[in-house]
Amino acid sequence: MRWALVKVCLAVTTMVVVAFAIPLGLVIKEMARDRAFSNAERQAAAVAPALSITTDRDQLERVVASAGSDSGMAVHLPAAGDRGSDQKALDIGRQRAAADDIATVRRLGRASTTEVSGGSTLLQPVALSSGKIAVVEVYVPESEVSNGVATAWAVLAGVGIALVVGSVAVADRLGVRMVRPARKLVEGAHELGEGKLGARVPEEGPTELRLAAVAFNSMADQVVQLLANERELAADLSHRLRTPLTVLRLNAASLGEGPAAEQTRAAVAQLEREVDTIIRTAREAKPQTAAAGPGAGCDAAEVVRERMGFWSALAEDEGRKWRVAGTERPVRIPVARADLAAALDALLGNVFRHTAEGTAFAVDVHNGEDAVIVLVSDAGPGIRDPEAAMARGRGSGSAGSTGLGLDIVRRLAESTGGDVRIGSSVLGGTEVRIWIQLDGREPVRRGHRVRRRRTGRLVPPFHRSRTLRGRRDELRRRDP
């Protein structure tokens, strides 16, 4: 905006200066020419009275000398004796004009100007006492015609340049006055988008930008207030779970000894810890919006083994076959351990909640150069509408479903620059793919698809051509 305003002012001022300076310069040149020839006419008029009285050479020479133009003036008298003769005589001074021009002026009786070497001459006819016509020639050099023109043009050019520079400077200051508040508004919006809730914009600049800054600051205050209310509500709702958790813990303590009783008590203890974590996080003054720093994260393989160890007991009770692959080696990801565990619990909980007992499931971890893929697949009936399932709060409509499980998974993947896809698994049911980006760049999801090897194991093809099998897999993912 600033440079656009400067360019507009520069163009307009230049057009105005050119429109006025060029005609004014031509007028000045013409005025200088008129001034030079007016002086020549005055010099010729000073000689005319003497010519009307006498034609004596000596007297005329004194008159020409008194006029101060003896070097640039000449007097042409007609030949004596023959009144009608066209013969001319150069009585005084140097002749510069052509003889034909002098004869024409004498015959017509009108003054005229003619171009000569080095300038121009004024030919002025004067009637003598004898009735004949004498011609007074006044030389006007070119320097006198253009006297002061160059200086006037230089002054005009300087004034024009000063006007252009002044208009550009004024436009630049106006542009800064307009752009600076707009830039601060943009910076404030970016800071607020990055989670810096204390970002505010100075209410300065033009009226429209001041109103925009006031609206932005009001919006930021409302966002802070809404987030504070949300944190308080989450803390209050989580605190209400303490009473039923206490009852569960007491009941679990009375179950006696055995693997099932120990697992139940461990699950209740973990649930209490999760509730405490939610309450502490919700009560914090500032939300945790910053990305994980260098060295932060967890071992995805370790978390998958731990959570599968928890869910395997329930899988054995329901007669489900399960499989884990890709957890033999450490797989570091830029995700907090609790977040990954919550995402896995959400996906595995959906498997147990929405598939019949005895339905097999599998968890695969694939470690690539720039991303880690976690696949959770089952042999259930599948998901008819994956887009609706990914919508926050939509859920499946069944009892106990809040519709937030897949949203938790999606937000975890997107926090690293990855994404979540729902498709068909090799087991015949649903496959949820979590793409976790390792370097924080945009997710590589256009050219990379998940393909199937003959062994049935899902692997990420980081470098492959679009074969018939790849196109088939792509169609399956678009229409699972």
Image: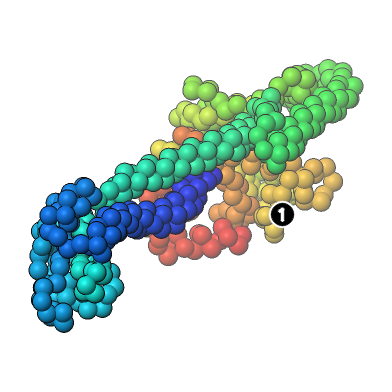
| Vertical relation: 329 (above or below) 262 | below
Image coordinates of residue 220 in percent, x first then y, are: 73, 32
Q: What residue type is labelled 1?
A: Ala
Q: Which residue is drawn at 40% across and 38% down?
A: 369
Q: Residue at x 52, y 46 (%)?
A: 5
Which of the 4 quarters of the picture holds residue 151?
top left
Instruction: Pinpoint residue 208: horizontal percent, then vertical percent.
Output: 70, 42
Which image quarter is the N terminus in? top right
Can residue 352 be seen at all in this image of the molecule?
A: no
Q: Position of residue 78 (x, y in %)?
A: 14, 72
**Residue at coordinates 16% horizontally, 75% vertically from top-left?**
103
Residue 35: quadrant of the picture: bottom left
Front-lying residue, 163 or 170: 163
Could you tell me if residue 182 is visible in this image? yes
Secondary structure, mark 1, is helix
Q: In which quarter of the image is residue 58?
A: bottom left
The answer to whether 9 appears left or right of 115 in the picture is right
Location of residue 439 in the rendering, given as x and y in whole percent from the top left corner:
46, 34
Q: Residue furthest bottom?
A: 84
Which color scheme did the rendering employ for the protein? rainbow
Estimate how packed mark 1 is, as few (under 14), some (14 to 19) or many (20 or more) residues with alpha carbons within 10 Å. Answer: some
User: Where, quadrant-wise, is the C terminus in this rendering?
Assistant: bottom right
* Residue linked to disc 1: 388
